Image (tube, grey):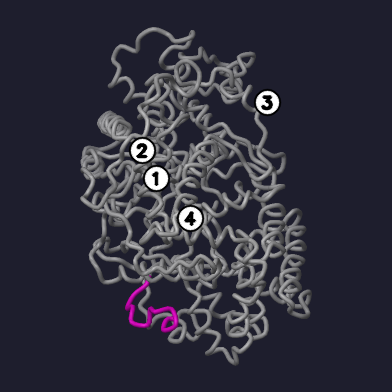
Amino acid sequence: MSHPLRLLCLALSIALGACDHATPPAPDAAAPTAATPPAAAPALGSFGFDTAGMDRSLTPGDDFYGYANGGWLQSVQIPPDRSSWNSFSTLGERALSDTRAILEAAAGNTAAAGDEARIGAWYTAFMDEAGIEAKGLAPLRPSLAAIEAIADKHALAKALGAALRADVDLLNATDYYTPNLFGLWVAPNLLRPNEYAPYLVQGGLGMPDRDFYLEGGRMAELRTQYAAYIAQLFELAGIADGAARAQRILALETAIARVHASQLETNDVAKGANAWRITDFARRAPGLDWAAYFAAAGLGRQPEFIVWQPAAVSGIAALVAAQPLRAWQDWLAFHAIDDAASYLPKAFAEAHFAFHGTALAGTPQQRERWKRAVDEVNDALGDAVGRIYVARHFSAPTKQRAEAMVANLVTAFGGRIDKLEWMSAQTKQRARAKLAGLKVEVGYPQHWRDYGALEARRDDALGNARRASLFEYRRNLAKLGRPIDRGEWFMLPQTVNALNVPLENRLIFPAAILQAPFFDGAADDAVNYGAIGAVIGHEISHSFDNSGALFDETGKLANWWTAQDLEHFEAAGAALAAQFDNYRPLPDLAVNGKLTLGENIADVAGLATAFDAYQLAHPDPGAALEGFTAPQRLFLGWAQAWRGKMREAALRNALLTNVHAPGQYRALTVRNLDAWYPAFDVQPGQALYLEPAQRVKVW
């Protein structure tokens, strides 16, 4: 997928693309070796497709998603430790197990050195529940005492600045919020992509979005549960007047929510390109002692920032002055406990999950501790783990085949550009230049991160987490003033996902997604093109979606369209948004076509590109397999890639905050492709039929 803040070099998206093959690994890169040869038979069915998961009693033209996935939907249950379950989850569980083996081996090797020792220490400390129980709240007490000692707003600004981190979790959250007052990321400058800039984004909320504080109905119930959770954490910490503190914190966060930008405003790249000099903050956002804040954050000498939501930054700064110091101290104390809960005794971790997992997302059961430990180690030492993961689980043949698919897909996308009747030669030339400069990296980075300065102890779970957070923050700050590292990865090889980096015109495709059901070396190529091929096409298309199209071939935020061409492109986007607005997964809540537009454009263009690329690779599609023609197999591969289930609470959150439509509607992208209609004999009068003029053609 992609995210509007992918301009921060982080696009949540599943796909890959490039106009050239990835270069050979640098000397410090782990050369992947196949631990086992490619499977002699596909992982799913006889040709790489789950025919048993279909419901052939349904008519494709009336319910294509159900036709492709009805059997699976009836038989599969969401595991109790999950808020949703889908194709990504299946691969995610496999990656968890593979990574667990790496961590346990490192933990058992007490003679290990370097990164292996760090991995083992990290895993051991987090898994040491008895040791964590014995320490109680002691590891956190110095921080709580320092918060209680804050005497004035100047000291408050220093405390807030010292807490600034590169913690805007765009890869693992449905949105990009941070509970810290502000979040920061360092990435190429939107306006000058040959230099780094620090991006400052709105924060301060403990719940996922402003709507959780301002809307009624379910949100009002969640606010009551949130206040109870806040009070519970204070009680567990032995801090008096928890209920009163909770009300102050909720009132403060509600005031913050009122000044926050909405999801749609935040998704507007043009509105985010706000360059502020460091001297501008006192004038444009009075109320916070910015000199003290930036000095404590290690940014006192940084001359310029990109302020993503300027009104929110100004509003939050004003609240620092207007709200009582006691409210801010309570707020800091709560978030310190909440942030540390996973590394504190069981009562804290269970309370944290009861609110964040069950109340917010509807997940009944917390995941096993080892699974949480894998996530923790990946967050802290992901490249060190990834280097071992790649050597064990990613083969050279898989990499080569994926790169060959990429080449076909880029060629096919170029052909689609050439065939656009509505686009002028001038704009086509710029689009072609952008495609020609697109880079892809498959499997793993060329250079691995150096964790030599990061200390990991076998008896200090919370300290490990805090040192890792500070290490990552300082690593980001160290980029400022240096040349752009165009080989940096923003995902781990063991992550089941992929991303587009528009400021670098680059795509990244981790090793872990190159597995069934997305990619299977023993599977029918039509299924592979419908699944991973369309994912690759999707990611290529992100360079040309409603946000990606704003960046030129150098990665600069610049208009390269003629006025008439841009008008046509925006009209197509509006039509696609209107199409998705009509999808209503819940009686009172519909898909937001504008919020999900970038992903939907990438899906339409990506699937169309995959269809074209398959035809390039297979001019003769051959005979049907088990009665399915090659076009049918390709479209069914796409539909099964998006099968999934989601608990209602998680679905409601996603509809408000996620830039992706739910999977069942992404599968219905086929409605916009002319080739789908004859493939399944879809006729007028059937529920999914669109007249040719209603089929949205984007790229």
Q: Quadrant of residue 326?
A: bottom right
Residue holding disc 4: 107
The x and y percentages for residue 321 are: 58, 85
The x and y percentages for residue 394 are: 36, 38
Residue density around tag 3, few if under 14, some if 14–19, many if 20 or more, within 10 Å: few
Q: Is residue 626 left or right of 59 when viewed as pictured?
A: left
* Magenta residue check for 297: yes
* Stretch in magenta: 294-305
Q: CA distance from mark 2 to mark 4?
A: 23 Å
Q: Quadrant of residue 238?
A: bottom right
| Mark nearer the N terminus (1 vs 4) | 4
Whether residue 273 can be seen here: yes
Instruction: Please name the amino acid that badge 3 sits on.
Output: Gln
| Mark nearer the N terminus (2 vs 1) | 1
Q: Which mark is residue 530?
A: none
Q: CA distance from mark 2 to mark 3?
A: 33 Å
The residue shown at (43%, 38%) is 513
Q: Disc 2 or disc 3, which is closer to the eye?
A: 2
The x and y percentages for residue 292 are: 46, 86
Residue holding disc 2: 394
Q: Which mark is residue 74?
A: 3
Q: CA distance from mark 3 to mark 4?
A: 41 Å
Residue holding disc 1: 389
Whether residue 420 can be seen here: no
Instruction: Please name the amino acid that badge 1 sits on.
Output: Tyr
